[in-house]
Amino acid sequence: MKKEEVKLLMKQNQVKQWEVAEAMGISEFTLCRWLRKDLKGKQLERLNSAIKKVRSGKEETNGKEGH
């Protein structure tokens, strides 16, 4: 996946780079270095999982605020 696509994916899911990095257990700096090149394989799998994790956490938090 191209780095531009990754950044767009994060924007569409309304997650920040630091949130994704935290969910992955890496520093924001490490994620920034990864995004210098296209991602594939295990890195891409970890990134997608982290985006989903952060997104679902935000949805749960937003859902609780409405009650």
Image (cartoon, grey):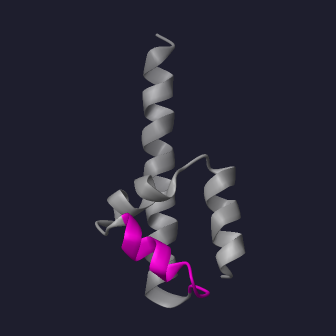
User: Could you tell me how many numbered marks the image carries?
Assistant: 0
Camera-nearest residue between 49 and 23:
23
Q: Please provide percent x and percent y for residue 16.
A: 52, 52
Q: Please provide percent x and percent y for residue 14.
A: 61, 46
Camera-nearest residue between 42 and 18:
18
* The quadrant where residue 5 appears: bottom right
Quadrant holding the N terminus: bottom right
For the point 34% across and 58% down, the residue is 22
Magenta stretch: includes residue 40: no
For the point 54% across and 50% down, the residue is 15
For the point 57% across and 83% down, the residue is 36
Magenta stretch: includes residue 30: yes
Q: Which residues are magenta?
A: 28-39
Q: Residue furthest left?
A: 25
Q: Residue furthest top?
A: 67
Q: Is residue 23 above or below residue 6?
A: above
Q: Please provide percent x and percent y for residue 25.
A: 28, 66
Q: Please provide percent x and percent y for residue 35.
A: 55, 78
Q: Is residue 59 above or below residue 7?
A: above
Q: Is residue 60 above or below residue 36?
A: above
